[in-house]
Amino acid sequence: MTDLQSLEQHPPSPSPKRPLVVMSNVSKSFSSGTLALSDMSLTVESGEFVSLLGPSGCGKSTALRIISGLGDVTSGTIDWPASRINAKGLPEGDISFVFQEPTLMPWQTVFGNVYLPLRLRGISKTAARQDIMACLETVGLKDFADAYPRELSGGMKMRVSIARALVTKPKLLLMDEPFAALDEITRQKLNDDVLRLWRETGITVIFVTHSVFESAYLSNRIVVMKARPGRVHADFPLATSLERGPLYRTSEEYRATCEKVSQSLLEAIGFPLADGLEMH
């Protein structure tokens, strides 16, 4: 039997899908002596929308910064099984970060702010224009390319920050409570926009929040973290036959998910809802 005949009769099994990022037994101590994370393990698959949920100070943002390479680990490892790794131990050009504040340059236009990561890569403004304008159109700001941050609302500034994160076409988008300071209507609209971007691009998202409602609405997986030192308390895969939108927000399924996640968060925190759990 020839090799070709053998392959036709016994085709190779498909390669198993490799995780995008794996945190293994990660701990993080600061010079002050604060132990932010303790033995935290988390695996994120490509294409997931994972929310890290927990109280303020539980290490959510610390975990995000470590994944991004903006912080190092005290012990444990961060692995990228499906990516080519650069000299810093990070996947090449695969990560973008949206911070709690838009962090825009006030002296630059919207176009200039979105252009920044491409300029740092040595790409000319002319070569970058099409990608920049496409990202601005995606976030609904195509007509504001020449505006300055001072001329924008809080929600619009955050949209610029998201466009800047997307313009490099990353595999992984890290979002650190980006909508916490916004009013409820703007926050819900941006939640819908991020969900649309996730569905359209297939990007992987890790989203930090301390809102039960936001995590249950956005995610296809919620990771509940214990109070400091942070580590995983519970991991909820979510599936729904309903499209995420106004009807989902009023559905029994959404209510039940919020109740289940809230109970888990109470267990992780160790005190009753009336004493301080924020569900907004």
Image (cartoon, rainbow, N blue to C red):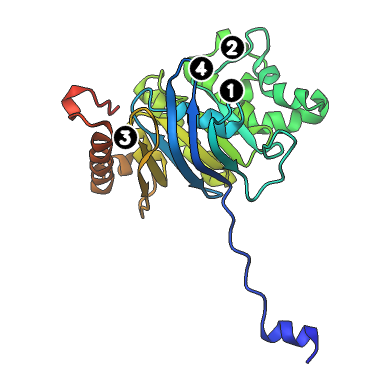
Residue behind mark 3: 213
Label pair 2/1, CB-CB below 8 angstroms = yes
Dividing the picture into quarters, in which one does residue 201 lie? top right
Residue behind mark 1: 160
Decide which of tag 4 and tag 2 comes sooner along the chain. 4
Decide which of tag 3 and tag 2 comes sooner along the chain. 2
Image position of 71 with respect to 234: above or below: above
Q: Which numbered mark, 4 or 2, is in the foreground of this view?
A: 4
Disc 1, SS:
helix
Q: Amino acid at mark 3?
A: Phe
Label 2, label 1: how far apart the Cα atoms are:
9 Å
Label 3, label 2: how far apart the Cα atoms are:
30 Å
Decide which of tag 4 and tag 1 comes sooner along the chain. 4
Compare residues 115 and 271 and report the one nearer the observer.
271
Q: Is residue 197 left or right of residue 259?
A: right
Compare residues 62 and 15 and report the one nearer the observer.
62
Compare residues 248 and 120 and report the one nearer the observer.
120
Label 4, label 1: how far apart the Cα atoms are:
34 Å
Disc 4, SS:
loop
Label 4, label 2: how far apart the Cα atoms are:
36 Å
Decide which of tag 2 and tag 1 comes sooner along the chain. 2
Task: In the rendered structure, find residue 177 and report the number of the disc placed on it.
Answer: none
Task: In the rendered structure, find residue 31 and report the number of the disc placed on it.
Answer: 4
Image quadrant holding the N terminus, namely: bottom right
Q: Position of residue 189 (x, y in %)?
A: 42, 30
Label 1, label 3: how far apart the Cα atoms are:
25 Å
Q: Position of residue 175 (x, y in %)?
A: 51, 30
Decide which of tag 1 and tag 3 comes sooner along the chain. 1
Residue behind mark 2: 149
